[in-house]
Image (tube, rainbow, N blue to C red):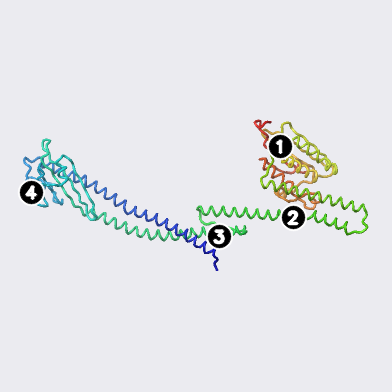
Amino acid sequence: MRGPGEKVRRKLTQSVQFKLALAFFALITALLILLNTYPIAASRDIVFSEKESSLLEQAGVVAASLAGLDTLSGDGAGQVVELLGLSGFERVVVTDAAARIIYDTASPSAEGRYALFAEIIRALGGERVFFSAYSGDAFVSHAALPVTRDGAVVGAVYLCELDTEQAEIILAFRDRMSGMSLIVFALACAVTFIFTRRFTERIKRLGDAVRTVREGDYAHRITPEGSDELTELSRDFNSMTETLEKTEEQRRRFVSDASHELKTPLAAIRLLADSITETEDIDPGTVREFVQDISSEAERLQRTTDKLLNLSRRDDGARGECVAVDVGEQAAGTLRLLAPLADKTGVTLRCEADDGCVVSAPEEDVYQIIFNLAENAVKYNVRGGDVLVSVRREGDKVALTVEDTGIGIPEKDLPNIFSRFYRVDKARSRERGGSGLGLSIVHDAVAALGGDISVGAREGGGTRFTVVFPARKEADGT
């Protein structure tokens, strides 16, 4: 059973389909009207031009012949007309200089009367006159020329032609065009109906897909059809939903991993606290040991929380103020902070730095990058191992390298080490206090600074991380 929303969408689809069909019909109708008018008008104009040339030429021949007569008379005019074979004209009129008719093929009784035709009056004034009209079933053409002798107008000749043959040709052409137009219109209507229906169905499927994804089904996809703009839109939609699906999966995994990371120390703290409160006659030494464990778990919880907040701020686009930071000095200061941790495992810390390794960045970001990389190098090293932090100036770049002689990273794990909560060895990571967030913080911080980070195996064992920053330009104050 369809709900109100489905009915509304159906009406909208029908409305879109009707508007598209109406637009196509209007366009097709305009084209067919143009096809049925322009060729007819063009053909008619061609006939007009031919008629003008032909009638004026023949009228000129008649006028020249009449001008050669000694006296302009009816008999002479009749002989000239008969000699020139002008019997095909509807009417031939010859007048004297006073516009009196001396010869008229249509009305012999009109001889001696005045020919008050506009064409003749204009011809007696020395003009070449032509006029033609198309009545639908015939071309009616008129031509008039003056008859001159010794430079003086002595009369005028007027020709009238009624041409039904060419009118019939144009009429037949018009009828064929009308018949073809009806067929084309019928085919166009059928194609338009099919096209608009298919087009609106594709739009409807796309709209349904959008609503499906909006309701939370990010796995929904559209099967692209054809190669038009809607196909590209469908591919973009699939790409968007794939990104949304990955983002949602990452969000869920992040929430799950974050909950697990927070749950583990909280459970340990609660267990230790319950042991203290529920055990009678517990000796002070055991209590002190339990309290130390609680403090250790609380510190671990604090570190995880701080890193989660750091990642959250980065996701929100929060950044500190960019200042001039000497990476070499920052590295040396960070290693001093890590010295107590290194002493516990006998790891030797070394720092080598060139002069002038200055970048423009928030100081906290540079510290987080160096600290997390160096801390991991210490934690995942072997007893008695080495950690070398080097800072080099390479043209307009500053390269930070952190390498250790530790356990290394398997090659299969390298593509994932910057993912949040990813651990190469989960058991050993938790044992050493790792949360799987440090390298994610490093990656995001480097990306925000426009730098690049790479990781690989160190020759002789261990891992080497290399971070390349854009150096601070001279114009910025270095």
Q: CA distance from mark 2 to mark 3?
A: 35 Å
- Tag 4: residue type? Glu
Q: Quadrant of the N terminus?
A: bottom right
N-terminal of the pair, mark 3 or mark 4, is 4
N-terminal of the pair, mark 2 or mark 1, is 2
Report the side of 103 relative to 219 (left or right).
Answer: left
* Helix, strand or loop at mark 2: helix
Q: CA distance from mark 1 to mark 4?
A: 116 Å
Residue positioned 77% across, 52% down in the render: 426
Q: Position of residue 8 (x, y in %)?
A: 52, 62
- Tag 1: residue type? Ala
* Helix, strand or loop at mark 1: strand
Q: Position of residue 295 (x, y in %)?
A: 84, 50
Q: Residue 208's mark?
A: 3
Q: Mark 1 = which residue? A: 399
Assess whether mark 4 and mark 2 are in contact (beta carbons under 8 angstroms). no
Q: Mark 2 = which residue? A: 259
Above or below residue 74? Residue 253 is below
